[in-house]
Amino acid sequence: MEEYTREPCPWRIVDDCGGAFTMGIIGGGIFQAIKGFRNSPQGMKHRMKGSLISIRTRAPQLGGSFAVWGGLFSMIDCSLVKVRGKEDPWNSITSGAMTGAILAARNGPVAMVGSAAMGGILLALIEGAGILLTRFASSQFVNGPPIPDDASQLTQASPFGSYQQYQ
Amino acid sequence: MPVTVGGPYGQSQPGCFDKIKMGFMMGCTVGMAAGALFGTFSCLRVGMRGRELISGIGKTMMQSGGTFGTFMAIGMGIRC
């Protein structure tokens, strides 16, 4: 999901899969802890036990489904990079939609279309936010004064004559 | 993850906490937008209209914004 620093292509699949699994485990742990705590009967002991059971049963499931999504997503992403020969936001939007469609394939064509639309819209939002964020961040983080060009190199005559293109 | 060192340009490297905050903000924005979209459909489907619809959409937006923000923050946190 991060477009700032991404692994080169074949290894991105492993990276995304593992990252998504970790993300799902930790996030699922947090949410299931709260949910299990609230759904348990009265008493601190019951509540702690309930939240622990809930984490143990549900967090790995969530991590697994995240990992499947992430792995399939970056597999399709890498295939698209290979096929199209370029990397742009459309790649990840397309692969998000295709991932949604493939993962809902067992539920019939209607569910596939709905899931594909959801994946595509979600990835489009994420990509759009990433583009906005990088544009915003580049104006936000102020760079230091740029290194002044060494002017002595400019006056030096090039041995190959002028590099200008005449057309 | 290749780290861009500040180097001669003197750019301050955003710290881990800054990254997590940024991730949360980004996830919150995305989640709110997604919640507005999907929440409208699902609230209209169950037959909410008028004031009830607005509050239903708002609730969905807040919920999905929080969830997305948390997950994005974690995703940023495990990579730094």
Image (cartoon, grey):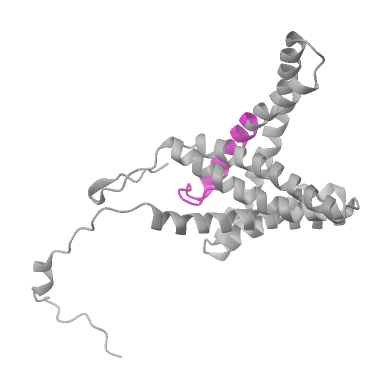
Q: Residue furthest front?
A: B51
Q: Residue furthest bottom?
A: A167
On the rendered structure, is A160 left or right of A10?
left
On the rendered structure, is B80 left or right of A60?
left
**B80 w.r.t. A76: above or below:** above
Rendering coords of residue B12 (x, y %): 32, 44
Rendering coords of residue B57 (x, y %): 77, 50
The residue closer to the viewer here, A36 or A81, is: A36
Q: Answer yes or no: is residue A74 visible.
A: no
Rendering coords of residue A106 (x, y %): 84, 47
**B20 w.r.t. A39: above or below:** below
Q: Answer yes or no: is residue A5 visible.
A: yes
Q: Which stretch did the figure color magenta?
A: A1-26
Q: Main secondary structure of the magenta part?
A: helix
Question: For the image shown, how many numbered marks are present on the structure?
Answer: 0
On the rendered structure, is B54 left or right of A78?
right
Is residue A134 covered in magenta? no
On the rendered structure, is A8 left or right of A156?
right
Is residue A25 covered in magenta? yes
Image quarter of the C terminus of chain A: bottom left
Query: Which residue occupies 50% across, 38% down?
Result: B20
Rendering coords of residue A45 (x, y %): 74, 8
Residue B59: quarter of image: top right
The residue closer to the viewer here, B13 or B2, is: B13
Query: Which residue occupies 63% across, 44% down?
Result: A70
